Amino acid sequence: MNNRIVSGMRPTGKLHLGHFHGVLSNWLELQKAYECFFFAADWHSLTTEYADTSGIGDSIREMVLDWLAFGIDHRKSVIFCQSKVPQHAELNLILSMITPVSWLERNPTYKEMQENLTTKDLSTFGFLGYPVLMAADIIVYKAARVPVGHDQLPHLEITREIARRFNYLYGNVFPEPEALLTETPKVLGLDGRKMSKSYGNAIFLSEGEEETRKKVMSMVTDVQRPRRSDPGEPDRCVAYSLNRMYLGAEDRAEIEESCRNAQIGCVECKRKQAEALVSFLAPLRAKRAELAAQEGLVDDVLLEGSRRATESAAATMEEVRRAIKM
Protein backbone atom coordinates (compact mmCIF):
# COMPACT_ATOMS: atom_id res chain seq x y z
CA MET A 1 0.00 0.00 0.00
CA ASN A 2 1.29 3.48 -0.92
CA ASN A 3 1.84 5.27 2.36
CA ARG A 4 3.88 8.19 1.05
CA ILE A 5 3.39 11.89 1.84
CA VAL A 6 5.11 14.87 0.22
CA SER A 7 5.12 18.39 1.64
CA GLY A 8 7.39 21.40 1.26
CA MET A 9 8.07 24.88 2.61
CA ARG A 10 9.48 27.88 0.82
CA PRO A 11 12.71 28.98 2.53
CA THR A 12 11.84 32.37 3.95
CA GLY A 13 14.28 32.39 6.88
CA LYS A 14 13.62 31.46 10.47
CA LEU A 15 10.18 30.10 11.25
CA HIS A 16 7.63 31.62 13.62
CA LEU A 17 4.82 30.34 15.84
CA GLY A 18 2.42 30.33 12.89
CA HIS A 19 4.67 27.88 11.04
CA PHE A 20 4.95 25.67 14.10
CA HIS A 21 1.22 25.36 14.75
CA GLY A 22 0.23 25.46 11.08
CA VAL A 23 2.76 23.05 9.56
CA LEU A 24 5.44 21.59 11.84
CA SER A 25 3.07 20.21 14.46
CA ASN A 26 1.23 18.33 11.69
CA TRP A 27 4.50 17.05 10.20
CA LEU A 28 5.54 15.74 13.60
CA GLU A 29 2.43 13.56 13.74
CA LEU A 30 2.59 12.51 10.09
CA GLN A 31 6.13 11.16 10.32
CA LYS A 32 4.92 8.67 12.93
CA ALA A 33 2.52 7.00 10.51
CA TYR A 34 3.67 7.77 6.96
CA GLU A 35 6.72 7.66 4.72
CA CYS A 36 7.37 11.38 4.54
CA PHE A 37 9.29 13.49 2.04
CA PHE A 38 9.79 17.04 3.38
CA PHE A 39 11.61 19.53 1.17
CA ALA A 40 12.90 23.08 1.08
CA ALA A 41 11.14 24.55 -1.95
CA ASP A 42 13.90 26.88 -3.12
CA TRP A 43 12.84 26.88 -6.79
CA HIS A 44 9.40 27.99 -5.65
CA SER A 45 11.06 30.93 -3.91
CA LEU A 46 12.17 32.17 -7.32
CA THR A 47 8.56 32.74 -8.39
CA THR A 48 8.46 35.86 -6.20
CA GLU A 49 12.11 36.44 -5.13
CA TYR A 50 13.82 36.07 -8.51
CA ALA A 51 15.23 39.63 -8.40
CA ASP A 52 17.30 38.96 -5.27
CA THR A 53 18.30 35.38 -4.53
CA SER A 54 21.10 36.22 -2.08
CA GLY A 55 19.23 35.15 1.04
CA ILE A 56 17.78 31.83 -0.12
CA GLY A 57 20.79 29.69 0.88
CA ASP A 58 20.90 31.01 4.45
CA SER A 59 17.12 30.75 4.69
CA ILE A 60 17.28 27.05 3.81
CA ARG A 61 19.79 26.41 6.59
CA GLU A 62 17.78 28.36 9.19
CA MET A 63 14.53 26.66 8.20
CA VAL A 64 15.96 23.13 8.27
CA LEU A 65 17.54 23.81 11.67
CA ASP A 66 14.09 24.73 12.95
CA TRP A 67 12.67 21.50 11.49
CA LEU A 68 15.30 19.35 13.16
CA ALA A 69 15.12 21.17 16.50
CA PHE A 70 11.36 20.83 16.66
CA GLY A 71 11.42 17.10 16.01
CA ILE A 72 11.46 16.38 12.28
CA ASP A 73 13.68 13.28 12.22
CA HIS A 74 15.95 12.84 9.19
CA ARG A 75 16.28 9.14 10.04
CA LYS A 76 12.52 8.66 9.65
CA SER A 77 11.73 11.24 6.99
CA VAL A 78 13.49 12.27 3.79
CA ILE A 79 14.58 15.89 4.22
CA PHE A 80 15.94 17.45 1.04
CA CYS A 81 16.36 20.53 -1.10
CA GLN A 82 14.16 20.80 -4.20
CA SER A 83 16.87 22.19 -6.48
CA LYS A 84 19.21 19.29 -5.66
CA VAL A 85 16.81 16.82 -7.30
CA PRO A 86 16.87 17.71 -11.03
CA GLN A 87 14.00 15.33 -11.81
CA HIS A 88 11.60 17.98 -10.40
CA ALA A 89 12.64 20.34 -13.19
CA GLU A 90 12.52 17.66 -15.89
CA LEU A 91 9.02 16.56 -14.95
CA ASN A 92 7.92 20.19 -14.60
CA LEU A 93 9.00 20.78 -18.22
CA ILE A 94 7.12 17.73 -19.50
CA LEU A 95 3.95 18.56 -17.54
CA SER A 96 4.04 22.16 -18.76
CA MET A 97 3.62 20.85 -22.32
CA ILE A 98 0.25 19.26 -21.52
CA THR A 99 -1.23 21.73 -19.00
CA PRO A 100 -3.83 24.16 -20.44
CA VAL A 101 -3.16 27.82 -19.63
CA SER A 102 -6.80 28.20 -18.55
CA TRP A 103 -6.19 25.81 -15.64
CA LEU A 104 -3.39 28.05 -14.38
CA GLU A 105 -5.29 31.30 -14.84
CA ARG A 106 -8.17 30.06 -12.69
CA ASN A 107 -5.80 29.28 -9.80
CA PRO A 108 -7.32 31.32 -6.91
CA THR A 109 -3.90 32.39 -5.63
CA TYR A 110 -2.70 33.76 -8.96
CA LYS A 111 -4.67 37.03 -9.05
CA GLU A 112 -4.76 37.34 -5.26
CA MET A 113 -0.97 37.41 -4.97
CA GLN A 114 -0.63 39.78 -7.92
CA GLU A 115 -3.00 42.18 -6.17
CA ASN A 116 -1.30 41.90 -2.77
CA LEU A 117 2.37 41.88 -3.84
CA THR A 118 2.22 45.08 -5.86
CA THR A 119 5.91 45.84 -5.26
CA LYS A 120 6.94 42.78 -7.29
CA ASP A 121 6.48 42.09 -10.99
CA LEU A 122 4.67 38.76 -10.99
CA SER A 123 3.72 38.80 -14.66
CA THR A 124 6.20 36.00 -15.34
CA PHE A 125 5.94 32.58 -16.92
CA GLY A 126 7.31 31.00 -13.74
CA PHE A 127 4.71 32.61 -11.47
CA LEU A 128 1.80 31.65 -13.73
CA GLY A 129 3.16 28.11 -14.00
CA TYR A 130 4.09 27.43 -10.39
CA PRO A 131 1.15 24.98 -9.95
CA VAL A 132 2.82 22.81 -12.62
CA LEU A 133 6.05 22.74 -10.63
CA MET A 134 4.02 21.97 -7.52
CA ALA A 135 2.41 19.04 -9.34
CA ALA A 136 5.84 17.77 -10.39
CA ASP A 137 7.08 18.03 -6.78
CA ILE A 138 4.27 15.76 -5.64
CA ILE A 139 3.78 13.19 -8.37
CA VAL A 140 7.48 12.59 -9.07
CA TYR A 141 7.39 10.67 -5.75
CA LYS A 142 4.00 9.10 -6.53
CA ALA A 143 2.66 10.50 -3.27
CA ALA A 144 -0.62 9.01 -2.12
CA ARG A 145 -1.55 11.96 0.09
CA VAL A 146 -0.66 15.60 0.52
CA PRO A 147 -1.30 17.40 3.82
CA VAL A 148 -3.32 20.54 3.08
CA GLY A 149 -5.74 22.90 4.77
CA HIS A 150 -9.19 23.53 3.30
CA ASP A 151 -7.97 26.71 1.57
CA GLN A 152 -5.34 24.71 -0.32
CA LEU A 153 -7.72 22.16 -1.83
CA PRO A 154 -8.01 24.03 -5.18
CA HIS A 155 -4.21 23.88 -5.57
CA LEU A 156 -4.15 20.13 -5.01
CA GLU A 157 -7.00 19.67 -7.46
CA ILE A 158 -4.82 21.19 -10.22
CA THR A 159 -2.18 18.56 -9.38
CA ARG A 160 -4.80 15.82 -9.64
CA GLU A 161 -6.01 17.16 -12.99
CA ILE A 162 -2.48 17.30 -14.39
CA ALA A 163 -1.77 13.71 -13.26
CA ARG A 164 -5.10 12.61 -14.75
CA ARG A 165 -4.31 14.28 -18.08
CA PHE A 166 -0.85 12.70 -18.25
CA ASN A 167 -2.33 9.26 -17.56
CA TYR A 168 -5.00 9.80 -20.24
CA LEU A 169 -2.44 10.78 -22.86
CA TYR A 170 0.38 8.34 -22.09
CA GLY A 171 -0.84 5.54 -19.85
CA ASN A 172 -1.33 5.06 -16.15
CA VAL A 173 1.91 6.24 -14.51
CA PHE A 174 0.82 8.52 -11.67
CA PRO A 175 -1.62 7.99 -8.80
CA GLU A 176 -3.90 10.96 -8.20
CA PRO A 177 -2.81 12.22 -4.77
CA GLU A 178 -5.56 12.56 -2.18
CA ALA A 179 -5.85 15.46 0.24
CA LEU A 180 -4.97 14.71 3.83
CA LEU A 181 -6.89 17.51 5.52
CA THR A 182 -5.00 18.99 8.44
CA GLU A 183 -6.08 21.43 11.10
CA THR A 184 -4.31 24.76 10.65
CA PRO A 185 -5.13 27.09 13.53
CA LYS A 186 -4.86 30.79 12.80
CA VAL A 187 -2.08 32.16 14.98
CA LEU A 188 -2.48 35.88 15.61
CA GLY A 189 0.50 38.18 15.36
CA LEU A 190 1.42 41.06 17.65
CA ASP A 191 -1.04 43.39 15.91
CA GLY A 192 -4.00 41.03 15.65
CA ARG A 193 -3.48 40.10 12.00
CA LYS A 194 -2.40 36.60 10.99
CA MET A 195 1.19 36.09 12.10
CA SER A 196 3.51 36.73 9.17
CA LYS A 197 7.13 37.68 8.68
CA SER A 198 6.09 40.14 5.97
CA TYR A 199 3.78 41.95 8.41
CA GLY A 200 6.56 42.37 10.97
CA ASN A 201 4.30 40.89 13.66
CA ALA A 202 5.91 37.49 14.21
CA ILE A 203 7.40 35.70 17.20
CA PHE A 204 10.22 33.54 15.85
CA LEU A 205 10.92 30.05 17.14
CA SER A 206 14.64 30.68 17.47
CA GLU A 207 14.77 34.24 18.82
CA GLY A 208 16.04 35.01 22.33
CA GLU A 209 13.89 34.81 25.47
CA GLU A 210 14.04 38.54 26.15
CA GLU A 211 13.00 39.37 22.61
CA THR A 212 10.01 37.05 22.97
CA ARG A 213 9.03 38.67 26.26
CA LYS A 214 9.22 42.15 24.76
CA LYS A 215 7.09 41.12 21.81
CA VAL A 216 4.41 39.54 23.99
CA MET A 217 4.32 42.67 26.18
CA SER A 218 3.73 44.76 23.03
CA MET A 219 0.74 42.72 21.87
CA VAL A 220 -2.66 44.32 21.42
CA THR A 221 -5.09 43.65 24.27
CA ASP A 222 -8.80 44.37 24.75
CA VAL A 223 -9.20 47.83 23.17
CA GLN A 224 -12.52 48.27 24.99
CA ARG A 225 -10.73 48.08 28.35
CA PRO A 226 -8.88 51.41 28.58
CA ARG A 227 -8.43 51.34 32.39
CA ARG A 228 -7.12 48.70 34.79
CA SER A 229 -10.36 48.97 36.81
CA ASP A 230 -12.57 48.21 33.79
CA PRO A 231 -13.82 44.63 33.36
CA GLY A 232 -12.24 42.94 30.35
CA GLU A 233 -13.28 40.32 27.82
CA PRO A 234 -10.63 37.70 26.89
CA ASP A 235 -12.40 36.92 23.60
CA ARG A 236 -11.65 40.46 22.42
CA CYS A 237 -7.99 40.31 23.45
CA VAL A 238 -5.36 39.50 20.82
CA ALA A 239 -2.71 38.75 23.44
CA TYR A 240 -4.97 36.29 25.24
CA SER A 241 -4.88 34.02 22.17
CA LEU A 242 -1.46 32.85 23.41
CA ASN A 243 -2.97 31.72 26.71
CA ARG A 244 -5.25 29.35 24.83
CA MET A 245 -2.19 27.67 23.34
CA TYR A 246 0.27 27.57 26.21
CA LEU A 247 -1.62 27.60 29.51
CA GLY A 248 -3.55 24.73 31.08
CA ALA A 249 -7.32 24.80 31.40
CA GLU A 250 -7.27 25.60 35.12
CA ASP A 251 -4.90 28.55 34.71
CA ARG A 252 -6.90 29.86 31.75
CA ALA A 253 -10.17 29.71 33.69
CA GLU A 254 -8.62 31.61 36.59
CA ILE A 255 -7.25 34.36 34.32
CA GLU A 256 -10.50 34.68 32.38
CA GLU A 257 -12.49 35.16 35.57
CA SER A 258 -9.96 37.65 36.94
CA CYS A 259 -10.01 39.60 33.66
CA ARG A 260 -13.78 39.82 33.50
CA ASN A 261 -13.89 40.94 37.15
CA ALA A 262 -11.05 43.46 36.70
CA GLN A 263 -8.93 41.58 39.26
CA ILE A 264 -5.98 41.32 36.88
CA GLY A 265 -4.57 43.91 34.50
CA CYS A 266 -3.39 43.44 30.94
CA VAL A 267 0.26 43.95 31.85
CA GLU A 268 0.18 41.25 34.52
CA CYS A 269 -1.74 38.93 32.22
CA LYS A 270 0.79 39.36 29.39
CA ARG A 271 3.64 38.64 31.77
CA LYS A 272 2.02 35.27 32.50
CA GLN A 273 1.58 34.66 28.77
CA ALA A 274 5.20 35.55 28.05
CA GLU A 275 6.56 33.19 30.69
CA ALA A 276 4.31 30.35 29.52
CA LEU A 277 5.52 30.80 25.93
CA VAL A 278 9.19 31.14 26.90
CA SER A 279 8.90 28.00 29.04
CA PHE A 280 7.33 26.06 26.16
CA LEU A 281 10.02 27.12 23.69
CA ALA A 282 13.03 26.79 26.03
CA PRO A 283 13.89 23.09 25.41
CA LEU A 284 13.31 23.45 21.67
CA ARG A 285 15.53 26.52 21.47
CA ALA A 286 18.22 24.76 23.47
CA LYS A 287 18.06 21.84 21.04
CA ARG A 288 18.37 24.22 18.10
CA ALA A 289 21.47 25.86 19.59
CA GLU A 290 23.00 22.42 20.10
CA LEU A 291 22.31 21.43 16.49
CA ALA A 292 23.54 24.76 15.13
CA ALA A 293 26.89 24.19 16.85
CA GLN A 294 27.40 20.96 14.87
CA GLU A 295 29.30 22.17 11.84
CA GLY A 296 28.04 20.72 8.58
CA LEU A 297 24.98 19.03 10.12
CA VAL A 298 22.38 20.68 7.89
CA ASP A 299 24.51 20.14 4.79
CA ASP A 300 24.91 16.45 5.65
CA VAL A 301 21.18 15.99 6.29
CA LEU A 302 20.27 17.67 2.99
CA LEU A 303 22.94 15.76 1.07
CA GLU A 304 21.68 12.39 2.29
CA GLY A 305 18.04 13.38 1.91
CA SER A 306 18.59 14.67 -1.62
CA ARG A 307 20.36 11.40 -2.50
CA ARG A 308 17.37 9.37 -1.27
CA ALA A 309 14.90 11.68 -2.99
CA THR A 310 16.84 11.54 -6.27
CA GLU A 311 16.86 7.75 -6.17
CA SER A 312 13.07 7.67 -5.93
CA ALA A 313 12.49 10.47 -8.45
CA ALA A 314 14.86 8.93 -10.98
CA ALA A 315 12.90 5.68 -10.97
CA THR A 316 9.70 7.61 -11.68
CA MET A 317 11.29 9.54 -14.53
CA GLU A 318 12.38 6.29 -16.20
CA GLU A 319 8.69 5.34 -16.30
CA VAL A 320 7.76 8.78 -17.61
CA ARG A 321 10.27 8.62 -20.46
CA ARG A 322 9.06 5.17 -21.46
CA ALA A 323 5.46 6.41 -21.35
CA ILE A 324 6.11 9.39 -23.63
CA LYS A 325 8.44 7.28 -25.81
CA MET A 326 11.40 9.61 -25.48
Image (cartoon, rainbow, N blue to C red):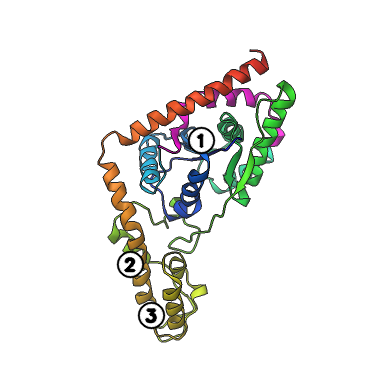
**Disc 2 secondary structure class:** helix
Instruction: Judge left or right: residue 295 versus residue 74.
Output: left
| Mark 3 or 2, nearer chain start | 3
Q: Quadrant of residue 133?
A: top right
Q: What residue did someone put label 3 on?
A: 265
Q: Position of residue 162 (x, y in %)?
A: 68, 32
The residue closer to the viewer here, 274 or 316, is 316
Residue 200 vs 114, above or below: the answer is below
Amino acid type at image mark 1: His
Which residue is depicted at the point 34% across and 36% down? Answer: 298
Q: Position of residue 127 (x, y in %)?
A: 57, 35
> Mark 1: few, some, or many residues within 10 Å (few <14, many ≥20)?
many
Q: Position of residue 188 (x, y in %)?
A: 48, 61
The magenta segment: 75-103
- Is residue 196 something one can see in this rendering? no
Amino acid type at image mark 3: Gly
> Mark 3: few, some, or many residues within 10 Å (few <14, many ≥20)?
some
Tell me the mark number nearer the camera, choosing from 3 and 2: 2
| Mark 1 or 3, nearer chain start | 1
Residue 132 vs 273, above or below: the answer is above
Q: What residue did someone put label 2 on?
A: 275
The residue sitting at the front extreme is 1
User: Disc number at residue 44?
Assistant: 1
The alpha-carbon separation of the residues under discs 1 and 2 comes to: 37 Å
| Mark 1 or 2, nearer chain start | 1
